Image (spheres, helix red, strand yellow):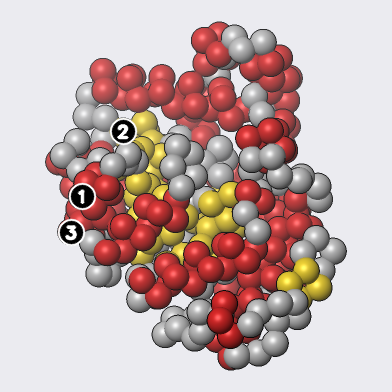
């Protein structure tokens, strides 16, 4: 199992420092989210200031971009990083696609499936000099003159990860993707009884072995060396869970555990923007099912105990900022290496 970190940076200097520190500490991959910044721009800078660190998006919003635009960006990043780039894509949810990005939203699983096929067709055309001729329900690409083709690169097999929570996207991961970003709002039981079986069904239909899919997850961590630090981090996790649980996309998890009524309550509060009232509805039972709790050096062994055989990569749902809690991260790594020698 690989131990990764997520970037939390606003300036070029911070991105450079994070990439250099993540590589020096011995993390395997630095993931960039699409929240406040474009995740691809951050990876370009991180690639310049690292040599062995894997670099990936977790996630880039697919439907905010044409597949052609994403194909160009991923091709360049694979070239700049000398094959260290992992393309992680997500659908986002309807309000963000329509109201934040002003892009069309329909049939997200089917559209993402075609998006992946289009990317691979475009890359194949560039690498092999073949005619571009992709015709699908949502996308059509038939024009690529030599002037606009970037041509072949040394590392053309760009891994595509997708993210999801519910059945259709899990099945798509098994069918087509190289990796699957499991949403941080998950439990071990949901992963074991729903996510992986759904992915297995998709893999079986495609004649694939599920072992071809790398399962990666961001995991909520209530880390701390004393009761005060753990209590502070526990409340931060409680708040984040309340936000995710209020979103209809994530109701499946609550329904699976019999918490569906709570999810509806949170949704009503969110609709009224009563955010401050929501965390109180998240019980300690829910936090313990979703999050890993312990001292920093205990996190690795407890992840192994919970996720062995279920995940291949883990990222703590905590910002990695060099100069902030360096000793704690070093202890987490030491515990990880003891758990995964």
Discs 2, 1 touching: Cβ within 8 Å? no
Q: Which of the marked residues, 1 or 3, is nearer the chain's N terminus?
A: 1
Mark 3 and mark 2 lie on one chain; the one further toward the N terminus is: 3
Instruction: State the SS at label 2.
Output: strand
Image location of residue 204, percent across then percent down: 74, 71
Q: Calculate the distance from the C-alpha at mark 1 to the C-alpha at mark 3.
A: 10 Å
Label 3 sits on residue:
24
The residue at the point 56 percent across, 37 percent down is: 185
Q: Is residue 56 above or below residue 145?
A: above
Asked if one can make out residue 301 in the rendered structure from this viewpoint, the answer is no
**Which label number is shown at residue 223?**
2
The residue closer to the viewer here, 84 or 280, is: 84
How many marks on residues?
3
Image point 49% across, 45% down: which residue? 34
Q: Give neighbour class at mark 3: few <14, some 14-19, many 20+ (Cα, 10 Å).
A: few
**Residue linked to disc 1:** 17
Alpha carbon distance from label 3 to label 2: 22 Å
Asked if 234 appears above or below 205 in the picture, the reply is above
Q: Earlier in the sequence, mark 2 or mark 1?
A: 1
The label nearer to you, 2 versus 1, is 1
- Residue drawn at x 64%, y 40% is 101
Q: Is residue 153 left or right of residue 160?
A: left
**Residue 317 visible somewhere in the drawing:** yes
């Amino acid at each position: 199992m690989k131990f990764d970190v997520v970037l939390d940076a606003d300036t070029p200097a911070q991105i450079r420092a994070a990439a250099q520190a993540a590589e020096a500490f011995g993390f395997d991959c630095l993931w960039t989210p699409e929240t406040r910044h474009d995740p691809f721009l951050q990876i370009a800078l991180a690639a310049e200031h690292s040599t062995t660190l894997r670099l990936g998006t977790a996630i880039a919003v697919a439907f905010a971009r044409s597949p052609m635009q994403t194909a160009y960006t991923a091709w360049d990043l694979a070239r700049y990083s000398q094959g260290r780039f992992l393309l992680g894509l997500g659908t986002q949810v309807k309000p963000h696609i329509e109201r934040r990005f002003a892009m069309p939203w329909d049939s997200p699983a089917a559209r993402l499936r075609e998006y992946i096929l289009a990317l691979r067709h475009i890359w194949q055309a560039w690498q092999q000099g073949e005619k571009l001729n992709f015709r699908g329900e949502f996308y059509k690409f038939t024009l690529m003159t030599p002037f606009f083709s970037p041509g072949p690169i040394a590392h053309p097999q760009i891994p595509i990860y997708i993210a999801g929570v519910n059945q259709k996207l899990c099945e798509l991961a098994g069918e087509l993707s190289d990796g699957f970003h499991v949403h941080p709002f998950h439990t071990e039981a949901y992963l074991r009884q729903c996510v992986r079986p759904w992915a297995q069904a998709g893999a079986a239909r495609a004649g694939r072995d599920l072992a071809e899919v790398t399962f990666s997850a961001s995991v909520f961590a209530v880390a701390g060396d004393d009761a005060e630090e753990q209590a502070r981090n526990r409340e931060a996790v409680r708040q984040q869970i309340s936000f995710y649980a209020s979103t209809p996309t994530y109701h499946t998890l609550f329904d699976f555990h019999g918490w569906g009524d709570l999810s509806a309550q949170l949704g009503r509060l969110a609709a009224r923007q009563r955010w401050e009232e929501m965390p109180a509805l998240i019980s300690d039972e829910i936090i313990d099912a979703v999050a890993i709790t312990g001292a920093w050096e205990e996190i690795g062994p407890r992840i192994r105990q919970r996720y062995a055989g279920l995940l291949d990569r883990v990222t703590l749902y905590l910002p990695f900022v060099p100069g902030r809690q360096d000793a704690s991260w070093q202890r987490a790594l030491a515990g990880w290496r003891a758990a995964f020698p």
